[in-house]
Image (cartoon, rainbow, N blue to C red):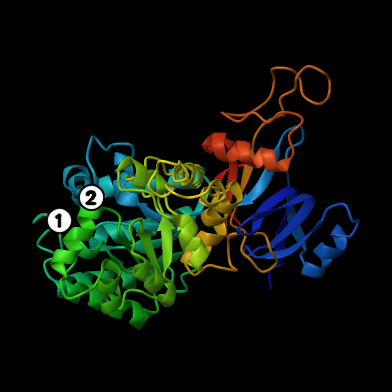
Amino acid sequence: MPAETGSIYIGTFIHCTSLTDLSFLENYAVGVDEHGTIKFVESAGDNKLEDHIKSCGWQSWKTFKAPKGGVGFWFPGFIDAHIHASQYPNSGIFGKTTLMSWLQKYTFPLESSLSSLPKARAVYSRCISRTLAHGTTTAAYYATVDVLATNLLADLAYSAGQRAFIGRCAMDSHLQPDYYRDASASSGIADSEASIQHINAIDPTHSLITPILTPRFAPSCTFPLLSGLASLATTHNLPIQTHISENSNEIALVRGLFPDHDSYAAVYNAAGLLTPKTVLAHAIHLSPAEQTLVKATGAHIAHCPASNTFLGSGICPVRELLDMGINVGLGTDVSGGYSPSILVAAREAGGVSRMRTAPRFRDGEGKEEGERDRMKLSVEETLWMGTRGGARCLGLEGKVGGFEVGMEWDAQFVDLGARVGDGSGGGGEEGVGGKGNVEVWEWMGWEDVIAKWVFHGDDRNVKAVWVKGRLVSGSMD
């Protein structure tokens, strides 16, 4: 039997312990076994580190220490609960479109072109490497209608070591372009099954790659396709992802296409698509009855603030959803969203929540100042959504999103550079320090450091990334 090995990480570890709280573990050691599972989280200064290592039975181990002389910390890997890998080249391209015209002008032509596998390989490889470089260790990907291109995305994510949910976009409605849709509901179901079988073949236990049933959204699908995909999800015990109530014109379209149902959410519920394993992107304009239905079915929301803003769709009432007990994660929604970074999504989530509090804004009108202030999302809350909330969306709660014994080591090391001084000799040298856009001044405590990172940080601050204990991006050198 080969000797067991492990890895030990020493430094500061920061993670969310609740929706509103961050834990700061300074001078700690985290032990991770060869399978990527956290075996201990202990103070590095209690003189018992050797005992913790011995208790793991490791014959050898590697040690990774936070670099000295700077501000750096380990943070859980980000979880992108909604991203279109097939749209990655179009990030930042909107023109003056809104959702429905944007799909026709930019999105469907690009996605359909990825039936060319060399082009798909180039796009998907770049998307995976860039999301990893931004600290995204788990992504819920939409692919295209093409089975081979979808399977290629799964292969590439598996090879790169990214934890991914891969969905073939199913869509058979006559509203889809003739050049980009399933021939029928039955062929759409069969092709989704084929993609599931491919992923089962490359990763039978879904240790990294999981199939996810993906009806694009109600206007793109007939009811038989919606219900058939729900049956597949039940048969294979798989998650589901789709869009809901993103745009007012979209909602009116759904009302006309499905007149026998009371609402957008009711269409999905009747088809069997609202389950505790369902992720609904956007959910901006849900009625109170629809919010209640989402809560009752245990479905989750992927909040996509950048996309909601730049496609002019609206502002999701996240505070009200959270108050109802609906779980909310974060999505970049590339390419409706302009950036593949969940840190940017957290930043945008905080920003749009503050916009809601403006006295003349519809949501803030007539409310007292204290009531308006409750709409604001804190840094802690947006980071929760980008880690623990996303994990809960994708059925990974207790597995990733934090640093606790038994969880898997999906992590990023964040390097903010040396502290900036004021020349008084109190810590930093005047005019020196920082990394990228981030400047941490010598007097700042951890709460301020995290705020600086959220609002100024980018991929230049992500020094290294691990998934399931494997180094998948950057290095600690």
Return the x and y of residue 172 as percentages of the image width and height. Answer: 15, 65
Quick one: 326 or 41, which is closer to the camera? 326
Ranked by sequence position, the earlier of labels 1 and 2 is: 2
Given residues 391 and 372, the one toward you in this image is 372
Q: Is residue 393 left or right of residue 174?
A: right
Tags 1 and 2 in contact by the CB under 8 Å rule?
yes
Q: What separation in Å lies between label 1 and label 2 (alpha carbons)?
A: 8 Å
Q: Which mark is residue 474?
A: none
Q: Is residue 342 visible?
A: yes
What percent of the width, then of the height, locates residue 170? 23, 65
In the rendered image, which quarter is residue 3 located in? bottom right
> Which residue shows up at 46% across the image and 70% down it?
206
Q: To which quarter of the image does residue 139 belong?
A: bottom left
Q: Give the residue type that dot 1 points to.
A: Tyr
Which residue is identified by label 1?
180
Q: Is residue 80 visible?
A: no
Residue 327 in the image: above or below residue 23? below
